[in-house]
Image: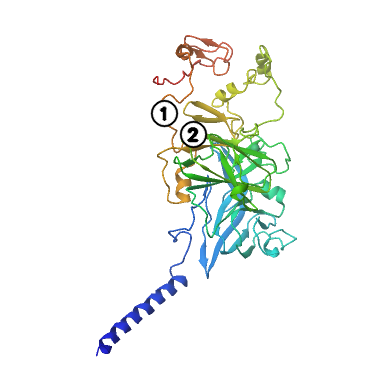
Amino acid sequence: MNTRRLMPLGVTMLLILVMGAVLVQRAVSGQTPVTSETIKDLPYTPVVTLNGSTLPWTMVDGVKEFRLTVEEISWEMAPGMRVKAWGYNGQTPGPTIEAVEGDRVRIYVTNKLPEPTAVHWHGVILPSGMDGVAGLSQRPIPPGDTFRYEFELKQHGTQMYHSHGDEMVQIGLGAMGFFIIHPKKPTHKIDRDYAIFLNEWFVQPGTARPDPNVMTDFNIFTFNSRAFPGTAPLGARPGERVRVRLGHVGQDFHAIHMHGHSFKIVATDGGDIPETAQWPETTVGIGPGQTRDYEFIAIPGDWALHCHLRHHPMNAMGHDIPNVLGVSQAGVEEKIQALVPGYMAMGETGMHEHMQHAKHMAGPPNTLPMMGGQGPFGPIGMGGMFTVLKVHEDIPRFATAAEYTEHVKLPDDLGWYNNPPGTVAESINPEFGKQQAAAYVCPMHPEVRQTQPGSCPKCGMALEREAAAPEQPHQ
Ligand SMILES: [Cu+2]
């Protein structure tokens, strides 16, 4: 009796199922393509490549497809300095490839360089013929051609990609990037995930073409091919778990030190380090061809993150500088100025004065001052491999890595830490700062000081009122 009434219902349900299946099929067959942009819920915390980007992908028949073009690019290392680099998709490091363990990936590489190339997937377990060593594992990619690489990701971890054809020139000019494979089954949640690629360059002051022939005497040291004060800060909120991934295919050793925290190195490019084998550190040593991942729980503050090799957080370092520390240069400067107008004797008491002159003593065009960057308490006096970890209560939670890099580009972004009362080191003599505040000094000759405005008897420059220590309410 109920059969007839049920029949139409069954037919309706069947129709709904069929229609649903058709819609799903349409979605799969490409009418609604699945891409990194259309996927709303990624099964991982996206990695932020500071001052960089993530490579978009498109799902084609169950394979994640990526496209890379290697070419000459104009790359800003910091405001005021651009170099002619060789990068991928307009960037050095190239955009970060992100995928998940178990994915099958297909990567099209187009060569727009004037010479052959190949791309090596550094640390990725794959068939020998996909390993990307020109001449050994494949034919080199000639200029103008596109090669296809395809393999299944059998592991997770921070891997890299880089040119493996004329490496000295191509990597030397920036042809490198991250290849990050997230675990299929994460063991714990990471709140913020940052990637920093290290590199060294030699750029003759006044030029824009990095010299790939230089073997050891580098003068620019970079995080994601940016030198401080051009490096984006890392943001986090107190208590968040932060992962920092370092990658390096350069020429030198680095010792990346982070202030204010004890962290654990949780993985290398060879895989995860078992928890029982991890030990606490404040500095991670990293050599060419290595990656290191470290994790920590964020502690409030503004914390320096830099290479601890002393010349690496500096810019435009020269190796021919005479050591004048402790040497009186009285009388020398005027004599040299007769031959070299504008010559400044410096370094007698250290390099702090040099840093204060950075603004009005510009070097050759397209050359960064050795040290720069303005902090909340004055000049920071660093360059190169230096950035800031900012752990503040109000650091925004960005929805995507692209949104982060769009809003956070330079050291000033995300603001400065609001120190609780009584937690900032300061002078024990409040009168000292006031005495100094009354002084007018020559920006070129710090020994010329007077209590009234005027001009310098040595160089004629207008004397500047010496910056007083910022007036802070007593706490
Ligand atoms: Cu270093």
Location of the N terminus (image quadrant): bottom left
Q: Residue 443's x, y, as percent?
A: 54, 18
Q: Is residue 202 above or below residue 34?
A: above
Which residue has dot 2 on it? 302
Give the numbered dot on residue 420: 1
Q: Are marks 2 and 1 in contact (CB under 8 Å)?
A: no
Q: Is mark 2 within 8 Å of ligand 1?
A: no
Q: Residue 165's x, y, as percent?
A: 71, 55
Q: Residues within 10 Å of mark 1 (few under 14, many from 20)?
A: few
Residue at (46% x, 59% y) in the render = 37
* Amino acid residing under circle 1: Pro
Residue at (68% x, 44% y) in the render = 287
Q: Along the polypeptide, which appears first: circle 2 or circle 1?
A: 2
Q: Residue 46's x, y, as percent?
A: 49, 52
Q: Is residue 329 above or below residue 250?
A: above
Q: Quadrant of ligand 1?
A: top right
Residue situated in front as seen by the camera: 398 or 84? 398
- Of all residues, the one furthest to the front in this rendering is 276
Give the numbered dot on residue 315: none
Q: Is residue 298 above or below residue 114?
A: above
Q: Secondary structure at mark 2?
A: strand
Residue situated in front as seen by the camera: 377 or 394? 394
* Amino acid residing under circle 2: Asp
Location of the C terminus (image quadrant): top left
Q: Secondary structure at mark 1?
A: loop
Q: Is residue 208 above or below residue 346?
A: below
Q: How many marks?
A: 2
